[in-house]
Amino acid sequence: MRMRFTAKAGRGVVALTAVAGLAVGATACSGGGGDGDDEKPQNSASASQGNGSQPSAQEGQSEEPLAEVKGPSGLLLQLTSAVRDAGGFITVSGALKNDSGTEVVVPSALSGNETEIINNGLSLGGATLVDSKSKKRYYVLRDTEGRPLTTTGFSTLKAGESIDVFLQFPSPPADTTDVSFQLPLFPSAVIKVSG
């Protein structure tokens, strides 16, 4: 099944509106670890990116985070929402903060190890969602040019600086409400999916 959607990107956040749907690139999960040699998705989502407005998923930013995980060099990732959209995808939103007292260079490992994503610059493209119930791993979606549908274009964070982040994934089955969010160099976190 091939589906298309339009992505409107603002500075570090994106509002995505489903126009028809998207191609799901999920593979079987072998155990739940985030750094294994799992197969990568063979299908890419079709999308186009442009300038636009803030996503409605950011509304949850003032509430208690779904999860908070600490990474290297004082980086702190707060996940504030995981919203299932009608087009068959999930948008995970939150903030990446430098919780240290000095400027931090964001590790390139967060982009993952897929050449197509790495070629598009630093991003959170290495993130995955794992649905333990159906034993599937979902990778960050990409547009038709291979760009990951996630926050991009950041390389350093000043002491105390925080940036809003988003990531889009294919949606697990409707009866799946808990998924494990995994990002290289950060511990896994179980988050609840709404919508």
Image: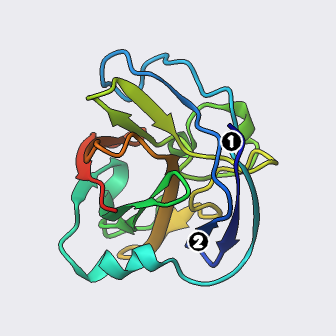
* Image coords of residue 162 (percent x, y): 41, 74
* Most distant residue in the left direction: 64
Image disc number at residue 117: 1
| Residue 72 shows in this picture | yes
Q: CA distance from mark 2 to mark 1?
A: 18 Å
| Residue 106 shows in this picture | no
* Residue name at image x 38 percent, y 29 percent: 34
Position of the C terminus by quadrant: bottom left
* Amino acid found under the numbered disc labelled 2: Val
Seen in the image, is 41 located left or right of residue 124?
right
* Residue name at image x 60 percent, y 68 percent: 16
Q: Which residue position is annotated with label 2?
A: 14
Q: Is residue 117 above or below residue 99?
A: above
Q: Nearer the viewer, residue 3 or 51?
A: 3
Q: Earlier in the sequence, mark 2 or mark 1?
A: 2
* Image coords of residue 76 (percent x, y): 31, 60
The colouring scheme, among rainbow, by chain, secondary structure or one colour, is rainbow
Q: Circles 2 and 1: CB distance less than 8 Å?
A: no
Instruction: Say which element carries label 1.
Output: helix
* Residue name at image x 61 percent, y 69 percent: 17
Classify mark 1: residues with Cα within 10 Å, few (<14), some (14-19) or many (20+): many
* Amino acid found under the numbered disc labelled 1: Ile
* Residue name at image x 76 percent, y 42 percent: 119
Seen in the image, is 193 located left or right of residue 37?
left
* Image coords of residue 33 (percent x, y): 32, 25
**Residue 194: which quarter of the image?**
bottom left
Q: Is residue 112 above or below residue 123?
A: above
Q: Nearer the viewer, residue 69 or 158?
A: 69
Classify mark 2: residues with Cα within 10 Å, few (<14), some (14-19) or many (20+): many
